[in-house]
Image (tube, helix red, strand yellow):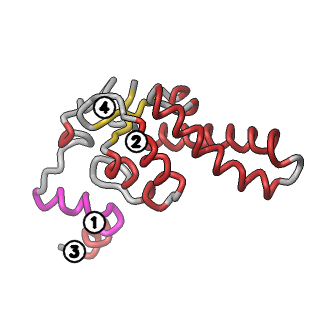
């Protein structure tokens, strides 16, 4: 391996380097029995980030209007509680938040059923902690999804 290959494999990441050596990871969601593309496939990261941005903006707006009364610092603090409540109530009942609905995403159990309310509560609490949502597996599921037995899919 020359210098260019070494730098190229370092820049492309460990997955690409392992695939060059013959490892077959399959597509995201294959281990879960989900389709590779289309409805029911694992939600792409761009849509998921867009959905959480919309949800957070909505929560900030609600917190600013209802609780903060002009104080932006207080609005940020209240928005976290509003976000928890929004996530708990919407994912626990219909399976998506307003942002997820806008981006065509849904949260389901790994076996395809609707996420139960206690599992949605666990998922929401871990999501508010932020760190579990930043640690992903090879199916692009954060720890909040893994611990609650959930997966985000396209509608």
Horizontal arrangement in the rendering, residue 76 relative to residue 24 (left or right): right
N-terminal of the pair, mark 2 or mark 4, is 4
Nearest-to-viewer mark from 1 and 2: 2
**Disc 3: CA contacts within 10 A as few (<14), some (14-19) or many (>=20):** few
Residue labelled with disc 3: 2
**Disc 2: CA contacts within 10 A as few (<14), some (14-19) or many (>=20):** few
Q: Secondary structure at mark 4?
A: loop
Q: Secondary structure at mark 3?
A: loop
Please state, as top left, top right, bottom left or bottom right, where the C terminus lies in the image: top left
The residue lying at 23 percent from left, 34 percent from top is 111
Q: CA distance from mark 2 to mark 4?
A: 24 Å
Residue labelled with disc 2: 118
Horizontal arrangement in the rendering, residue 106 relative to residue 20 (left or right): right
**Disc 1: CA contacts within 10 A as few (<14), some (14-19) or many (>=20):** some
Q: Position of residue 27 (x, y in %)?
A: 23, 42
Residue at the left extreme, as displayed: 22
Asked if labels 2 and 1 touch by Cβ distance under 8 angstroms, the answer is no
Horizontal arrangement in the rendering, residue 155 relative to residue 10 (left or right): right
Q: Position of residue 37 (x, y in %)?
A: 29, 29
């Amino acid at each position: 391996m020359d210098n260019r290959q070494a730098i190229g494999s370092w820049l492309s990441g460990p997955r690409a380097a392992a695939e060059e050596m013959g490892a077959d990871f399959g597509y995201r969601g294959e281990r879960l029995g989900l389709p590779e593309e289309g409805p029911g496939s694992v939600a792409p990261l761009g849509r998921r980030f867009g959905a959480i941005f919309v949800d957070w903006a909505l929560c900030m707006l609600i917190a600013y209007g209802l609780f903060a009364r002009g104080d932006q610092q207080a609005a940020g603090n209240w928005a976290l509680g509003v976000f928890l409540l929004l996530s708990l109530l919407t994912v626990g009942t219909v399976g998506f938040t307003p942002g997820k609905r806008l981006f065509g995403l849904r949260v389901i159990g790994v076996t395809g059923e609707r996420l139960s309310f206690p599992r949605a509560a666990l998922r929401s609490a871990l999501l508010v902690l932020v760190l579990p949502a930043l640690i992903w597996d090879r199916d692009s599921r954060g720890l909040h999804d893994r611990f609650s037995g959930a997966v985000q899919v396209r509608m």
